[in-house]
Image (cartoon, rainbow, N blue to C red):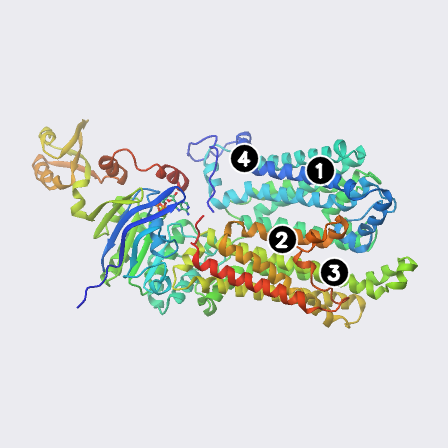
Amino acid sequence: MSENPPVIRTEKLVKRFGAVRALDELDLTIATGEVHGFLGPNGAGKSTTMRVLLGLLRADSGTVEMFGRDPWRHAVALHRRLAYVPGDVELWPNLTGGEVIDMFLRLRGPYSTARRDELIERFALDPRKKTRTYSKGNRQKVALISALASDVDLLLLDEPTAGLDPLMEVVFQQTIKEATQNGRSVLLSSHILAQVEALSDRISIIRAGQVVESGTLSELRHMTRTTIEVETARPAGEIAGMSGVHDFRTEGERIIFEVDGERVEDLMHQLAPLGVRSLVAHPPTLEQLLMRHYGEDLGHRSVAEGAQKG
Amino acid sequence: MPETTSGTLPHTSVSPAPTDVAPLVRTGSLLRFMLRRDRIRLSIWVLGIGLMALYFSNAIQVIADGVEELAQMAVLFSDPVGRMMTGPAFGMDEPSFERFYAAGYVLFLYILFALMSVFLLVRHTRTEEQTGRAELVRANVVGRHATLTAALLLTGGANAAAAVLVWVASGPVAGYDAAGTALVAAGGFSVGLFFMGAAAVAAQLSQSSRGASAMAGGLLGLAYLIRMGGDMVEQGGSALSWFSPLAWSQQTAPYVEDRWWPLLLPLVAAAGMVALGFWLSTRRDVGASLVPPRLGRATARPSLGTPVGMALRVLRGMLRGWAIALVLAALMFGSYAESMVDAADGLPEEVAMIMTGDDLMLGYLAYMSLFLAIFVAAAGVSGLQVLRSEEVHGRAEFALSLPMSRTTWLGAHLAVLLGGLMALTLLVGLGTAVGAGASLGDLEHTGSLLLAGLHQFPAVLAVVGIVVALFGWVPRIAGTVGWVIIAFSGIATNFGPMLDLPDAVLNLNVFGHLAQHPVEDITLAPVLWLSTLGVAGLVLGLLGWRRREVNRV
Ligand SMILES: Nc1ncnc2c1ncn2[C@@H]1O[C@H](COP(=O)(O)OP(=O)(O)O)[C@@H](O)[C@H]1O
Ligand SMILES: [Mg+2]
């Protein structure tokens, strides 16, 4: 049997907007059935990548293939196999949420109304309200429901949880897991590490239009450092000397320090005998991570972009 | 398009507003903030009005060589059609440059004052709430009436500044009589305040800024229509004129009777509406509207599942709005047919020998068909702007992520738009015919009036074609060029002969080439080449749209 082409493959993909190189030789590969976390700060080029993948923007140079075909030239055929949730979902203000969902599902092909209704129920969306009255989170739900209820091979999700509350984020994660069990591939962009961590098989980190790291979560472990605040029954001074522990300090009863991703297990063995009374662990933010590994410069573009999008 | 806010808020803490803050706290800071954000738009509006006044008041003195020539041109304003377009035409039996200015041009300044007021007030109140920025502002220590007060001060100030410029342009610069000039400026100010009040009320009633602008703008349209009807009946206006806020300022009869008291009407009405606006704003929450949003359908009708179904929902509201306005206008214009026959009685004998009352009436109806067709084309341009905003707001991008080709998307929207414009053309023709039939008491002209309306469609198609071609290749300027074409068509059609424009310029008027049915017989050539131009534009636009990037700002 011949091997399937990757669902998405870009090589040295360049996209310029005037003087700005929004994508600067971007390499990205996503295999069939994979959930790929696409992680980068605001203005890094995530949405631009999605638009090139959809054939809405044209690559300036480099290769881009979806299911082995050029998205600029075969957009319609490719779109039969994918569903897209835009980063800034804008809907038709005079339609209700339910109408938008139905319109999208029908234009995409046959679909199950039972599945649609189930998703509306799970996302707790009122489909009878005009979309002009929806919050950003509700508009995102509309796009998500219409994408998840479609029978497609690939989901392109551009920061799909940015407007969802924590409860809905859980629903989102469940539904994505179900979708992947049915063999779908997912490209999931975000600027928050924790959001992609929970779902992704592989993660690519994009910064100033370039993929700077790519791999499975455990391959990226070396990059992460967890901040730990712990209160122990017995003195815990010895922790400070462990390899992989940084910035050790004491605040009243608690000790606070950072530990490398790959040393977490060792640390737990050391801590347990000391009698842990309370323990808080903060995952690193993407910004901390990028800062630590690539210095201060997150790309100047991110500043303006971040301010604009708030 | 997401707007970037230049300037920072005066206060940035986000603690919830204490409930005991005085209602006007921080009005000053808000006003400064608005001025800063709007310094360019505001200057364009105010200076624009000033420049228009400068142009109008001085151009007449260049166009007409002397009082005799003025007297000939005065007929343009004082005949019933002229009065419909520009107003009651005071003092046209003894025209002077300043009277000519007041009778023929000042109305357009007044309309600009009104549009500026609606635009500024809605922008700083309902638009802010719609985008959620108002919530940020209200979270600071800001009184609950502060935003509306600041927006009113801003708008009122802009009107005052524009009025001063109008005064400078017509008085000291053009050298017109002081009392009349003061009235012209005060008239503009009063119209501005009236529509500021209307916008303050509309901003409370509607939940979207578009809805609020449409409400206040609709009132302006209504005021214009009522004034048309009122002023056309007799010189100096009739009782009907007095129901139009635009007419109130004109009834001051600048440079003729110079009466101030009519201005009391708009000022009192403005004060009342502003008070109503404040009162209504206390009866609702931030971001909410007084007209409660209704629940709609949970599932879509089957028709929505096709590209054309989608396009229909995108364009339906806009087409419906134009249809209502234009059919009302057509009915009204049609119903003046009888007065045109009567007006012929007053014509000098020499003219009456070559022109019967019927000729005059049919000429008038031919002119009305042309005039309304320009509005149908305007509907076309605004429909294409709806498409552009589909693109800019990312809805086109979202729709194109479906297995729907670019051609299908644009084709479906254009099919709906052109179908709608065709229906509008027919409805307008029908409206004119029914209005004329009712006033004349017989329906003998129905067929020819329908045909007269339909006959204008190639010109509408040509305008749409040009704008679609631009949408495909240079989308950024498409809307602007579209409106320039409409404005030019309007000016060339209404004032072309009077402005003494060279033929080369007049030939650029898309609407200047078709025969004036029913007074003239239809000639095929312009019908054919205008249609060809239109279709070529559509094809070109589709080709451009297929190969250009979507929403590349
Ligand atoms: N249509 C456009 N025109 C000009 N510049 C753009 C356009 N779209 C994006 N950019 C720029 O490209 C860069 C990448 O933007 P984007 O892909 O939206 O980033 P992200 O989605 O990761 O936040 C930014 O610097 C942005 O300002
Ligand atoms: Mg983005």
Q: Which residue is mark 2?
A: B485
* Residue B355 point in image, percent of width and height: 86, 63
Q: Which residue is mark 4?
A: B34
Of the numbered discs 1 and 2, the one sitting upstream in the chain is 1
Q: Is residue A33 left or right of residue B137?
A: left
Tell me the residue at 24%/52% (across/down): A199
Is residue A34 something that shows in the picture? yes
Q: Which residue is mark 1?
A: B54
| Mark 4 residue element | helix
Instruction: Tell me the kind of residue under disc 3.
Output: Tyr
User: What's the residue at 76%, 33% (across, down)?
Assistant: B171
Question: Going by the picture, which residue comes out furthest to the front?
Answer: B504
Left or right of B303, for residue A269: left
Discs 3 and 4 share one subunit: yes
Q: Which of A259/B48 is in front?
A: B48
Pick whichever of labels 2 and 4 is earlier in the sequence.
4
Residue type, mark 2 in image: Ile
Q: Which residue is mark 3?
A: B367
Tell me if label 4 and label 1 are in contact, CB under 8 Å.
no
Q: Mark 3 belongs to which subunit?
A: B
Give the label, 3 or 4, closer to the camera: 3
Q: Which callout, 4 or 1, points to the residue nearer the camera?
A: 1
**Kind of residue indicated by mark 4:** Met
